[in-house]
Amino acid sequence: MKKKERVYSDEQISILEQNPYTHSVTPYRLTFTLAFKEFFMSQVYKPGMTCPKILKAAGYDPKMFSRPFIDHLRKRILVEAASPEGLQPPKGLSQAERIKAFAEKDLDSQRTSTSLKELQSRVVHLEQQVEFLKKISNTLHPPEV
């Protein structure tokens, strides 16, 4: 079985997660919100509005996406909109919903090893985000020498 190539870097994931139209993102998959699909449909038939222009208007950098991704995105949303069910919200929890659920968890009732593993995973993720923000900050405001 061929190994799946990584699509989004950690920096790209951090950028994509900050967009309110992003439901969830992993190195291999980006899921858009229902609001994005509705925005896309409101723009797609306007004269001169191409898929990259719609992505840019939604706050995404079209250069982050491959041409096949962009073409498939357009086709997928148009097919979903034309279906009897219409546009559907994405399945699963968004990043914000996962954070809220984690904050509401009663860690005392979990086994200690499970709690520690979950906390360790969150700390690693937060450290990666902090490093990314440091890099962005240094790029935008280089230290004076």
Image: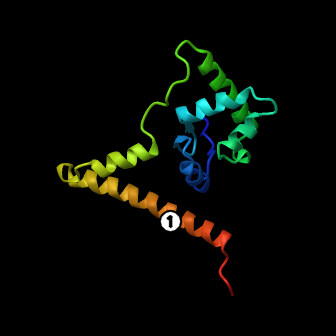
Q: Is label 1 in a helix, a strand or a loop?
A: helix
Vertical side of 95 occupied by 38: above or below: above
Give whichever of 42, 119 is nearer the camera. Answer: 42
How many other residues sit within 10 Å of disc 1, few (<14), some (14-19) or many (≥20)? Answer: few
Q: Residue furthest left?
A: 109
Left or right of residue 13, residue 61 in this image: right
Vertical side of 134 occupied by 121: above or below: above
Residue plotted at (69% across, 24% down)? 75
Quadrant of residue 66 within the rendered picture = top right
Q: Residue furthest right?
A: 48
Quadrant of residue 11 within the rendered picture = bottom right
The colour scheme applied to this rendered structure is rainbow
- Residue type for callout 1: Val
Across and down, in percent, residue 58 comes to: 65, 42
Q: Is residue 18 visible?
A: yes
Vertical side of 57 occupied by 48: above or below: above
Judging by the rendered image, the residue that carries numbered circle 1 is: 130
- Give the mark count: 1
Give whichever of 83, 131 is nearer the camera. Answer: 83
Vertical side of 39 occupied by 101: above or below: below
Q: Is residue 1 visible?
A: no
Residue plotted at (17% across, 49% down)? 109
Residue plotted at (22% across, 55% down)? 112
Across and down, in percent, residue 21 comes to: 56, 41
Left or right of residue 113, residue 27 in this image: right
Residue plotted at (57% across, 50% down)? 13
Give whichever of 44, 102 is nearer the camera. Answer: 44
Q: Residue furthest top?
A: 84
Quadrant (top left/top right/bottom left/bottom right) for the N terminus: top right
Across and down, in percent, residue 104 comes to: 28, 48
Quadrant (top left/top right/bottom left/bottom right) for the C terminus: bottom right
